[in-house]
């Protein structure tokens, strides 16, 4: 495979939600992911998968412990520095795949690029078109997001997460709304990009069949890592 | 840049909401501009009628009627050096009776330097028959006096001054200064003629001053007094002679400003509440944008830009509407036969109103913008 440097490291990560009662949802998580690896995270609902993904993606801070991305300790970074890191290095697809409904598919896809640039370059538009084509939604590229089906929106969200060629792709049940054939197609796209660009994939999924096709399965239970299977 | 595009798209996609708020702002600004322009025009009209054809500052001998100003040339030179003085014109004046066609009427004989006094009275334009006086012994007579005494250019009239020999003068022309009291009482002539009528020799009785800013006339008068430092001269200004008018104007001005301020405040509140709703409606979008790497600062700008855009479009529409309203109002008055309000469009006022409206609208976005900056993406992402 590709270079085996560590792209992502979690050291002793705890997460406690404070409120009227404090609830600890992550307990001493220690994980390392190699650059270019293709990983899945599985586990029952409420086991802490989304919380873990948000912490990895720097959207949330751990209560204790460290998240290290590409050698960079994220706890030292300011909010603005984290925003830049997310924009350049991390692509997200959320469980509820939010697009901006008042923008077209193409415009949604270009937003991560436009956060760092004044206007889209011809190269980035070509890349967007290629990815939309790969995801099988080239024909709806000029439709408003709110006029698209759930499955189409999900695919646009995936393309949007990939547009800035991130080092890390984080997805929270990204194929939840897709039929099994589309699901297989999307995973083929993920694999393709993983192999071509060396993007590291971390995918939370309920789908055992899909999980079994990944290089590594991390299973969570009650906020701890229950199993960590590599092939 | 992206923030601006997001703001514009958020507004254009919520079309009904946006049109409603912009119409509301436009109507409010229209009323504000209408009131401001109307009151402003009325006030300028009043002030103009009061000081337009009169000196704003007058320097006379303290001794009173008929007394002369000693060393008046020096005084005149000094007065001209004072900041804010545009015209300083010597004048020799006194009371007399005018006799003509077997009739008599009391009059003020005003001797002045036609060129110097032009900046105060605008006499040349006021002459509607005959011409201005050119030689000693020629005078101008006002419309009402000419009618009362049946005078025409070329006629002779006699000026009678107590304890002086009468003087015969020729009517060179008739004027109309649009103030009845002046038209019926003033016989206007050259300084030399007046000096000879009142046997003043080379002396004058007053120096009449026009100033740059009529509302600063009192300050200019004070500066003149300080500069001259002469106890034998009294320096009057139009403001002290018209205190009631000024009090009235001030009251009107304050109520006009209060109304305009209230309108701007309601504009700010309307925009702020619309944007406060918008920031709630767009929570998901803001969260996702932050996850994609938009900075808090840019997330907040989206709402400032929305306020700015609403204010910009609303105020331009409002100003046009306000001008239309003013035009319709004055044409209506004209048709009803009321004296036409001489309204002029005060460009400075319009620009200031526009600037204030746009700034206030942008500031209306501050609270929603803060909320947008503080929104944490996990909050939204954890919601189903
Ligand atoms: N903001 C929060 N405050 C308190 N508890 C939370 C919050 N978010 C998630 N949790 C709790 O943390 C646990 C893990 O949630 P989550 O990470 O969403 O699990 P999963 O994605 O595996 O279903 C759940 O018990 C959930 O109720
Ligand atoms: Mg979850």
Image (cartoon, grey):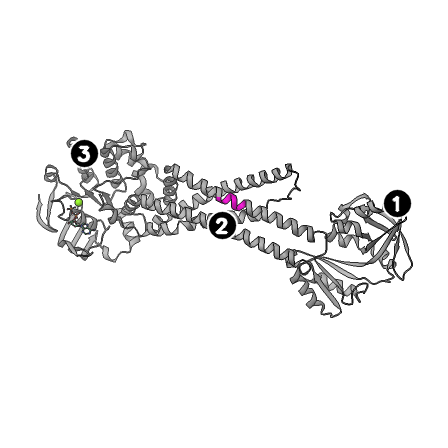
Disc 1: which residue: B154
Please state the chain letter of the residue tagged with numbered disc 1 in the rendered image. B
Where residue A147 appears, x then y in whole percent?
29, 32
Mark in the foreground, 2 or 1: 1
Q: Which image quadrant for residue B306?
A: top left
Q: Is residue B10 above or below residue B82?
A: above
**For this rendering, which residue is in front, B283 or B40?**
B40
Mark in the foreground, 3 or 1: 1
Residue at 67% across / 65% down in the picture? B222
Q: Which image quadrant for residue B130?
A: top right
Looking at the rendering, the stretch of residues picked out in magenta corresponds to B28-33
Where residue B126 appears, x then y in whole percent?
76, 46
Q: Is residue B297 magenta?
A: no
SS assignment at label 1: loop
Where residue B289 appears, x then y in whole percent?
30, 45
For the image, the number of numbered tags is 3
Q: Earlier in the sequence, mark 2 or mark 1?
A: 1
Q: Is residue B29 magenta?
A: yes
Disc 2: which residue: B356
Please state the chain letter of the residue tagged with numbered disc 2 in the rendered image. B
CA gap between label 2 and label 1 equals 59 Å
Q: Which mark is residue A178?
A: 3
SS assignment at label 3: loop
């Amino acid at each position: 495979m590709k270079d085996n440097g560590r792209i992502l490291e979690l050291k002793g990560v705890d997460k406690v939600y404070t409120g009227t009662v404090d609830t600890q949802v992550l307990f001493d998580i220690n994980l390392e992911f190699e650059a270019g690896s293709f990983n899945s995270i599985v586990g029952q609902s409420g086991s802490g998968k989304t919380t873990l993904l948000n912490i990895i993606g720097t959207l949330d801070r751990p209560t204790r412990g460290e998240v290290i991305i590409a050698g960079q300790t994220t706890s030292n970074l300011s909010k603005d520095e984290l925003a830049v890191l997310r924009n350049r290095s991390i692509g997200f697809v959320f469980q509820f795949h939010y697009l901006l409904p008042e923008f077209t598919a193409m415009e949604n896809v270009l937003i991560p690029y436009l956060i760092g640039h004044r206007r889209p370059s011809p190269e980035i538009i070509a890349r967007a078109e290629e990815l939309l084509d790969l995801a099988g939604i080239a024909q709806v590229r000029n439709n408003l997001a709110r006029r698209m089906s759930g499955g189409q929106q999900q695919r646009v969200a995936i393309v949007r997460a990939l547009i800035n060629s991130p080092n890390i792709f984080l997805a929270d049940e990204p194929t939840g709304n897709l039929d099994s054939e589309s699901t297989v197609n999307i995973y083929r796209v993920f694999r393709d990009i993983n192999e071509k660009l060396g993007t590291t994939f971390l995918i939370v999924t309920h789908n055992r069949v899909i999980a079994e096709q990944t290089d590594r399965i991390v299973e969570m239970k009650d906020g701890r890592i229950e199993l960590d299977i590599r092939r | 840049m992206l923030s601006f595009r997001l703001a514009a798209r958020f507004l254009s996609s919520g079309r009904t909401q946006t049109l409603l708020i912009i119409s509301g702002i436009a109507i409010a600004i229209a009323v504000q501009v209408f009131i401001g322009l109307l009151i402003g025009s009325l006030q300028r009209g009043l002030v103009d009628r009061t000081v337009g054809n009169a000196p704003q500052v007058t320097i006379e001998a303290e001794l009173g009627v008929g007394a002369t100003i000693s060393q008046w040339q020096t005084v005149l030179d000094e007065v001209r050096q004072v900041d804010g003085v545009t015209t300083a014109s010597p004048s020799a004046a006194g009371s007399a009776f005018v006799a003509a066609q077997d009739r008599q009427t009391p009059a003020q004989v005003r001797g002045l330097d036609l060129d110097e006094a032009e900046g105060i009275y605008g006499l040349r334009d006021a002459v509607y028959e005959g011409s201005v006086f050119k030689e000693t012994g020629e005078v101008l007579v006002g419309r009402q006096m000419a009618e009362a005494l049946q005078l025409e250019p070329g006629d002779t009239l006699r000026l009678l001054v107590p304890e002086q020999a009468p003087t015969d003068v020729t009517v060179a022309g008739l004027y109309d200064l649009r103030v009845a009291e002046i038209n019926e009482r003033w016989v206007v002539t050259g300084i030399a003629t007046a000096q000879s009528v009142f046997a003043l020799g080379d002396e004058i009785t007053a120096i009449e001053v026009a100033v740059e800013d009529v509302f600063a006339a009192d300050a200019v008068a004070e500066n003149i007094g300080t500069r001259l430092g002469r106890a034998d001269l009294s320096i009057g200004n139009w403001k002290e002679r018209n205190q009631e008018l000024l009090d009235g104007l001030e009251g009107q001005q304050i109520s006009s400003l209060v109304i305009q301020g209230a309108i701007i405040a309601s504009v700010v509140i309307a925009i702020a509440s619309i944007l406060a709703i918008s920031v709630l409606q767009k929570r998901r979008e803001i969260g996702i944008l932050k996850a994609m790497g938009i900075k808090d600062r840019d997330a907040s700008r989206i709402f400032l830009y929305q306020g700015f855009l609403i204010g910009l479009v609303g105020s331009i529409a409002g100003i046009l509407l306000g001008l239309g309203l003013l035009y319709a109002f004055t044409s209506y008055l004209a048709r009803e036969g009321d004296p036409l309000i001489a309204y002029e469009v005060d460009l400075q006022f319009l620009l200031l109103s526009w600037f204030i409206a746009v700034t206030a609208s942008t500031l209306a976005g501050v609270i929603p913008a803060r909320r947008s900056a503080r929104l944490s993406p996990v909050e939204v992402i954890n919601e189903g």
